[in-house]
Image (spheres, rainbow, N blue to C red):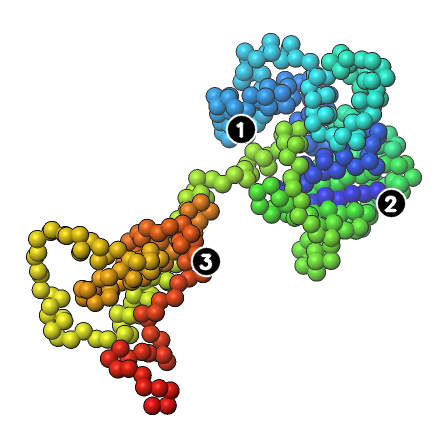
């Protein structure tokens, strides 16, 4: 079978490919060969190397060490290379004393599904061997390890029944404008007779030889959907992802990233596409949230205030204007009756205070707008001042609003100076 896996950087195409090969039963017990997956911790040779030990064991187990992480990130960013022994010469003894089989087994148990690990558990139980005493020669026949090969064009020479995973194949088989089909690609049409499964990975198969597209049995395309989710498109043939009709015809699902595989190989996607929000993004979200609250305040508080100011039928007289312009200085001595005049009889109805019922002559009364968050509820007036209210009343106004009998609509006005004499009078 030929499997095609595509997706832009950050979509998790390599991560999900490893998950597929290590979890699906049709790949079980077979030799696995791979090309162009850096520092894959399922490769015993990688586990033995200083770089494999450093990334897959030492850094993995000390990722909270800020001094260590800071130096590693600086080398990655400034020099664009992997860590070498020369960068940490004092870790040489730690590396020499490490057990590469222990490292391999750690990642085998972390990466493979429980169903696929059943054979390993059975082997240890029947042989009555302590897992820490296992050697690679004892593990090798179980085929949990992956073996690197250098030349993808030589895949035909690899053992029958093997699984062959090749990343970034557009480097080796770009689109042909003319000429014969390369022999190693022509062999795809008959590779079923050898029992081999080919797994090709690239960003977009439009950048790969058309013969690879035509021979594809299964195509899976991943697109970044946000946080730890990716959109997954599947079809039993090649999907032209630039064609919206072909994408729509494919089986689509939203899947979670296999985060348990993080660290199983070095991924530039994980190094450069951190899914956590940056400080700038967080600041933008906070400012956006504040803008929405201000907009709502203007919409529900400011607009009624301006509407009343400009469109109300009640216009101030010349006497009222003159009086409002006078500055009257009075002693600041409030007695109990004045204080009680401002206390509403019903807290959720500020206008029920005696001051608004003829005791004094106020220009306006508090018009409340309440808003609710996940943990709190607050109310403000049309002058953007805070109005304290019980939680239940605040939530009721925030969710259902509050009828204000003092606001008359255009087609329903009550004349306070005259009494109604009946429906037809």
Q: Is residue 237 left or right of residue 40?
A: right
Q: Residue at x 68, y 41 (%)?
A: 13
- Front-lying residue, 293 or 83: 293
SS of the residue under disc 1: helix
Query: In what quadrant of the picture does the C terminus appear?
Result: bottom left
Cα separation, mark 1 vs mark 2, equals 42 Å
In the rendered structure, which disc, 1 or 2, sits on the residue that comes first in sequence? 1
Image-quadrant location for residue 138: top right
Q: Is residue 160 left or right of residue 307?
A: right
Q: Residue furthest right?
A: 193
Query: In what quadrant of the picture does the N terminus appear?
Result: top right
Instruction: Point out the frontmost of discs 3 and 2.
Output: 3
- Front-lying residue, 50 or 321: 321
Residue 176 visible, this angle? no
Image-quadrant location for residue 114: top right
Q: Are marks 1 and 2 in contact (CB under 8 Å)?
A: no
Q: Position of residue 295 (x, y in %)?
A: 38, 58
In the rendered structure, which disc, 3 or 2, sits on the residue that comes first in sequence? 2
Q: Is residue 363 left or right of residue 26?
A: left
- Front-lying residue, 163 or 138: 138
Q: Residue at x 78, y 43 (%)?
A: 3
User: Can you identify the residue that label 1 sits on?
Assistant: 76
Q: Which mark is residue 189?
A: 2
**Is 118 above or below relative to 329?**
above
User: Can you identify the residue that label 3 sits on?
Assistant: 399
Q: Residue furthest bottom?
A: 425
């Amino acid at each position: 079978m030929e499997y095609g896996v595509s997706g832009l950087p950050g979509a998790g195409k390599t991560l999900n490919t490893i998950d597929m090969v290590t979890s699906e039963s049709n790949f079980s017990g077979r030799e696995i060969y791979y090309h162009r997956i850096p520092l894959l911790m399922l490769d015993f040779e990688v586990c033995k190397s200083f770089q494999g030990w450093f990334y897959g064991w030492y850094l993995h187990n000390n990722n909270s060490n800020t001094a260590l992480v800071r130096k590693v990130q600086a080398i990655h960013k400034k020099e664009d290379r992997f860590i070498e022994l020369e960068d940490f010469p004092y870790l040489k003894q730690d590396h020499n004393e490490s057990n590469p089989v222990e490292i391999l087994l750690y990642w085998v148990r972390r990466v493979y599904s429980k169903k696929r690990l059943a054979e390993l558990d059975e082997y240890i139980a029947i042989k009555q061997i302590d897992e820490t005493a296992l050697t690679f020669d004892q593990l090798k026949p179980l085929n949990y390890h992956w073996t690197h090969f250098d030349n993808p064009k030589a895949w035909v020479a690899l053992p029958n029944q093997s699984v062959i995973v090749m990343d970034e194949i557009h480097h080796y088989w770009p689109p042909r404008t003319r000429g014969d089909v390369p022999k190693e690609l022509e062999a795809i049409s008959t590779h079923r007779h050898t029992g081999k499964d080919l797994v090709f990975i690239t960003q977009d198969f439009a950048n790969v030889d058309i013969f690879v597209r035509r021979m594809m049995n299964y195509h899976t395309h991943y697109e970044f959907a946000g946080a730890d989710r990716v959109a997954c498109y599947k079809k039993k043939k090649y999907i032209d992802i630039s064609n919206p009709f072909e994408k729509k015809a494919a089986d689509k699902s939203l899947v979670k990233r296999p985060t348990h595989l993080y660290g199983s190989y070095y991924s530039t996607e994980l190094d450069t596409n951190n899914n956590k929000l940056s400080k700038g993004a967080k600041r933008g979200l906070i400012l956006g949230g504040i803008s929405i609250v201000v907009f709502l305040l203007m919409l529900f508080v400011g607009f009624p205030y301006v509407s009343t100011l400009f469109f109300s039928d009640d216009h101030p007289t010349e006497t009222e204007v003159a009086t409002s312009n006078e500055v009257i200085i009075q002693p600041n001595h409030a007695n109990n009756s004045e204080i009680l005049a401002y206390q509403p009889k019903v807290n959720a109805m500020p206008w029920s205070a005696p001051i608004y019922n003829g005791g004094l002559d106020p220009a306006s009364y508090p018009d409340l707008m309440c808003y609710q968050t996940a943990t709190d509820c607050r109310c403000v007036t049309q002058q953007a001042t805070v109005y304290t209210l019980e939680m239940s009343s605040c939530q009721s106004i925030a969710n259902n609003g509050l009828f204000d009998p003092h606001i008359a609509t255009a087609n329903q006005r009550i004349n306070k100076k005259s009494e109604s004499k009946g429906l037809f009078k």
